Image (tube, rainbow, N blue to C red):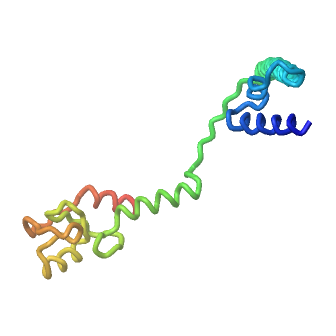
Amino acid sequence: ALELRRHDRHVRIEARLRGCSACSAALELDSSSQGAMLRNRHELSIGSAEERARALAQRLQVAERHLREVEGALPLRIDVVVEAEPCRRERIALEVHVESALLCPILHELIQDPVVAADGFTYERWAIERWLQRSNTSPMTGAALAHRYLTRNFALRRILGSLG
């Protein structure tokens, strides 16, 4: 009896290491009565699993049929809701995103008189003029500027004007 318990424990440990305990144990055991009993238990568990799978498949089919019936009974109606303005959270996010794009990189304030420097970035006119009095480099990249001419950014000026 003690030897049989040791054998069972050994088979269970090997079965855990290999995967399915019932399959591994059935393969390891010889044709003894215990091996036959274990195989029989395994076949029963497979049979009950197949029965459960069939029952669940039938329940799924019934639920799908019921869903189609309910969908068919619903009136087809599409309501289009148009909001006068986007919801508050979206509007705030949009304002923050737009406002950050309209900030002068030197002042970190909204640009009033936008100009483009030789580095291609847009700045507030008086801030970049003051910068250029002290330095010949780009405030954004630190690279030397090809020239000190400033060009008005008319597109950004129009956008700022439309914002009010």
Residue 161: x and y, percent?
Answer: 34, 61
Residue 46: x and y, percent?
Answer: 81, 21
Residue 98 relative to residue 45: left or right:
left
**Where 104 falls versus 74 (above or below)?**
below
Spot the residue most to the right: 1
Quick one: quadrant of the N terminus? top right
**Where 11 falls versus 147 (above or below)?**
above
Q: For residue 69, say whether it is visible.
A: no
Residue 138 relative to residue 164: left or right:
left
Instruction: Please name the residue shown 30% across and 57% down the image.
Output: 158
Quick one: quadrant of the C terminus? bottom left
| Quadrant housing residue 137 | bottom left
Q: For residue 90, say whether it is visible.
A: yes
Q: Nearer the viewer, residue 104 or 76?
A: 104
Q: Nearer the viewer, residue 116 or 37?
A: 37
Instruction: Please name the residue shown 14% across and 66% down the image.
Output: 150
Residue 88 relative to residue 27: left or right:
left
**Where 113 falls versus 84 (above or below)?**
below
| Quadrant housing residue 4 | top right
Residue 92: x and y, percent?
Answer: 52, 61
